[in-house]
Image: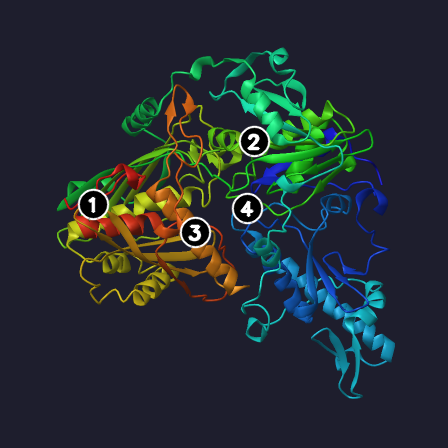
Amino acid sequence: MKQLSRRAFLLRSAAVGGGLLLEVVLADRGAAETGQATVEQSPEVTAWILVHPDDTITIRVARVEMGQGSFTGLPMLVAEELACDWSKVRAEYASTSEHLRRGRIFHTMATGGSRSIRDSQEYLRQAGAAARMMLTEAAALHWGVPLSECVAENSLVSHPPTQRQLSFGVVAADAARLPIPADPPLKDPATWKRLGQPAARFDIPDKVTGTTAYAIDTRLPGMVYASIAQCPVFGGRLKSAQAEKIADMRGFIKVLPLEDAVVVVAKESWWNAHQALRALPIEWDFGDNATVSSASIMDFLREGLDLETAPVSRHQGDVDQAFASAAKTVEAEYYAPYLEHATMEPQNCTVLYTDARVDVWAPAQNSEATVAVTAETAEVPVDRIEVHKVDLGGGFGRRGLYIEFVRQAVMIAKTMPGTPVQLIWSREEDIQHGRYRPVALVRMRAALDAAGEPSAWYVRQAEQSIFSTVRPGLVRDGVDMVGVRTFADAPYAFPNVHMEYAMRNTHVPPGPWRAVAHTHNPFFRECFIDELAQAAGQDPYRFRRKLLAGAPKDLAILDAVAEAADWDTAPPQGVHRGIAVQDAYGSYTAAVIEVSVNDAGALHIDRVLVGIDCGYVANPDSVRAQLEGSVVYGLTAALYGEITIKDGRVEQSNFHDYQMMRIAEMPKVETILAPSGGFWGGAGEPGMSPLAPALCNAIFAATGKRIRSLPLKQHDVRWA
């Protein structure tokens, strides 16, 4: 097989789904080099499934586990069709090098966009079904009986006419020699036995006992440690660093200047490297962005709102005529700040660079992208790179498209061949050099007719684009097609609609933040819908119901959550409710939040009800956990989340000024799963969408104050 050069590999790579879509086949290399058994040496029935002689089954997982439960949910898809004994199933990560060497046999190794289950479900179920057919055929051949007389169930192949049985482990070797069925039929969902049932997650025991090894836990013989300081102002450059000033500090090895950063490498511990870095005299060239502030960015956004024209993201009907004949108009502006991901595990990467190969341990959401970045930076062919996949200590979109920490670590390791190097960003570096949820300012206007029914809706978005530089194909006629989601695809039945998008890019680097546009845009939209309900003198839930008459899935989940909240019954005295609905990532979500506010303006979130229709559910426990986690992450952002800019740099630096919700603040959370079947939706991000608007709508119900900007910590929520 022809060896593929680094450049050819990169040229045949395309950014896709937060990662790289690679169409490559790599030259084969032996098990001793890769640490993976070859096809001939392993009990492989298909690439996904290894059936061992003791009847245990290993199912390979291509996506990474970062708390969302995919390390268990994906094997459940295979196991359902395989008809195996779930108690004997184990999971392991699929090797990235094997994936590439075998022509992308595991489809993709990118994790993001709430796609792990919904994008994988068909081919994983087919893999399980194919393996079941092969195991059954192997048993039939062994017995010399018709295949149609054999049945596979619970890791056994049975021949009912003669009451004979063979276990999967007995026939696996023979099955592996059979051709893989091209298009195996899949089970009717009504017959599922594993899918849809709660399953204990494979990753939880080690996490509970503290034995899970994350990338940051990597330890190799002779390893050295690196700490990095990047220019505080985005776009700035390093001018100088006086290495001689720290040469006598404990463990010091060297200072490595980079274009926009400086690294200190030390022995024994990362703390040695970091202490030396803190003592290092550094001079920066801050460049032209050193005067940028949150105030100047706000002015820039407002200019976008006031432009005479802007690219159109959606248009239908005659908005001008509808406004001209309106009985009432409602207008409002809404704002959402930059947000940082704040993963529990900061950015880090361990690299061992040798003449023979490059080994990488990184908390990356896409190991294929990690290979590409490593190949480009190390200037080595991709078949000399091994990315060791590990669980992530949080992802939230930060480690998908943007893995500059990998590039930095490879650059350092390349200067120290044969020595493993571990780069760790400090928490301050992590927060001050993130890829932030974009800042956004939105103006909305709506017309109501004499009956209080909406007749027109106008939207002008002024916000930063995530994808204009990294995936320009997602920008069409000046509109970031991801940035306008929630508005351009809104399910509400307005007869006349005109929406515009004014791209306002700044020097602050943006990136996908959990649920991407489906976080701030639902806050804008769903709070404004509440404003319209108030102006029309209608109940906000029933107002939405009328507008969603043509969107049955949205309507059904809205009804399910309202019913669970007993919306038509008044809450206890002093408790007030807000509601919101959203569809995102192929799923439909809604939330009702109950709050109370005392005379001093102290806000207490009493109860959160959040529901989802994601079509089919693989593991309901994982879906509930994702909704509960969304409550923590979403309410944290609504209450406290804000990245501000002063003198061109991020002001926040750690959890003392980038605050998280604490345990004592957590409300009671009730999750409603309403799977309607017929499709597969995501679960990791959709639950985020209705939380901020439901909370702010509840605050309005409690205080009469309309919240039009976040975070809530900036507002006095005492009774108006």
Instruction: Please give the residue where the numbered disc 4 appears in the rendered image.
Output: 112
State the CA–CA distance, disc 2 to disc 4: 22 Å
Identify which residue is drawn at 56% across, 16% down: 280
The answer to which of marks 4 and 3 sits earlier in the sequence is 4
The answer to which of marks 4 and 1 sits earlier in the sequence is 4
- Crowding at mark 2 (Cα within 10 Å: few <14, some 14-19, many 20+): many
- 636 over 3 or under it: above or below: below
Q: Position of residue 242 (x, y in %)?
A: 59, 11
Identify which residue is drawn at 50% across, 37% down: 474
Do the residues under discs 2 and 3 have CB atoms within 8 angstroms? no
Q: Is residue 555 visible?
A: yes
Q: Nearer the viewer, residue 342 or 108?
A: 342
Do the residues under discs 4 and 3 have CB atoms within 8 angstroms? no
User: Circle 4 — which element?
Assistant: loop
What amino acid is at disc 1?
Answer: Gly
Do the residues under discs 3 and 1 have CB atoms within 8 angstroms? no
What amino acid is at disc 3?
Answer: Ser
Instruction: Give the foreground label among 3 and 1.
Output: 1
- 574 over 139 or under it: above or below: above
- Crowding at mark 1 (Cα within 10 Å: few <14, some 14-19, many 20+): some
- 343 over 56 or under it: above or below: above
Q: Which mark is residue 630?
A: 3
Q: Is residue 487 visible?
A: no
Instruction: Give the foreground label among 4 and 1.
Output: 1
Instruction: Please give the residue where the numbered disc 1 appears in the rendered image.
Output: 601
- 649 over 269 or under it: above or below: above
State the CA–CA distance, disc 4 to disc 3: 15 Å
The answer to which of marks 2 and 4 sits earlier in the sequence is 4
